[in-house]
Image: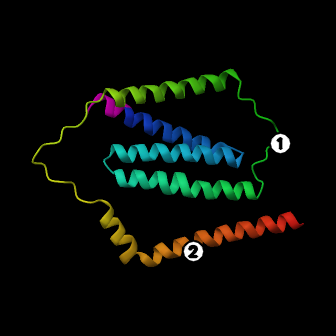
Amino acid sequence: MSLGYEFLFYLFGLVAIASALTFVTRKNPVSAALWLVSTMFSLAGLYVMLDAHFIGAVQVLVYAGAIMVVFLFVVMLLNLGQSDEPHDFRKPATRIVAALVGLGLLAELLTILRAPLPEIAPNAEPVANAVSPVAEAAFGAYLLPFEITSVLLLVAIVGSVTLARRKAIQ
């Protein structure tokens, strides 16, 4: 295991933990959702580093993408994101944290760019398809739980729209 790999692993882990703690401590649901997106991206980076590329892609597409868009849509629909006090992001502590995050991302980028490209042996066997087993399980043996989950998400969206309309009418 190379030093760059360990550095990235700990960096992604630290960003995931810090983002999760910040997510839990936010009062504003919109900023909390954005910190949750940061946590999801860090977890996707950890999955990719563990050679689980499909799970990393699903993490970004499904959780950081679709679920968070639905969550933010519901928060904005219910008008929950309004804060009483204005926020000032020009404080010195905020600038220091932003600079540290920027330096961490720059170090990550430089580590990735300096890493040598993997060599593929000419007689290496092709990697098995990673999507087929997941698709066979999701749409075969686990089709009913998969569909029940999608119906539950639909019911949650319809319920939030109903609550928002009821609140807007009153």
> x, y (%) of residue 58?
43, 56
Going 52% across and 45% down the picture, which residue do you hit? 39
Residue under numbered circle 2: 151
Going 33% across and 33% down the picture, which residue do you hit? 6
Camera-nearest residue between 42 and 154: 154
Give the magenta range: 1-7
Residue located farthest toward the left when viewing the structure as drawn: 123
Please determine whether, in this image, residue 21 is positioned above or below residue 109: below
Residue 156 located left or right of residue 101: right
Given this view, does label 2 or label 1 mark the residue nearer the observer?
2
Picture quarter with the C terminus: bottom right
Quarter of the image where one finds residue 111: top left
> x, y (%) of residue 113?
35, 28
Quarter of the image where one finds residue 108: top left
Query: Mark 1: which secondary structure?
Result: loop
Badge 2 amino acid = Val
C-alpha separation, residue under disc 2 versus residue under disc 1: 36 Å
Quarter of the image where one finds residue 134: bottom left
Residue 111 located left or right of residue 119: right
Going 36% across and 68% down the picture, which residue do you hit? 135
Near mark 1 (Cα within 10 A), the count class, few <14, some 14-19 or many ≥20, is few
Badge 1 amino acid = Asp
Q: Is residue 161 magenta?
A: no
Q: Which label was assigned to residue 84?
A: 1
The answer to which of marks 2 and 1 sits earlier in the sequence is 1
Please determine whether, in this image, residue 53 is positioned above or below residue 12: below
> x, y (%) of residue 68?
59, 54
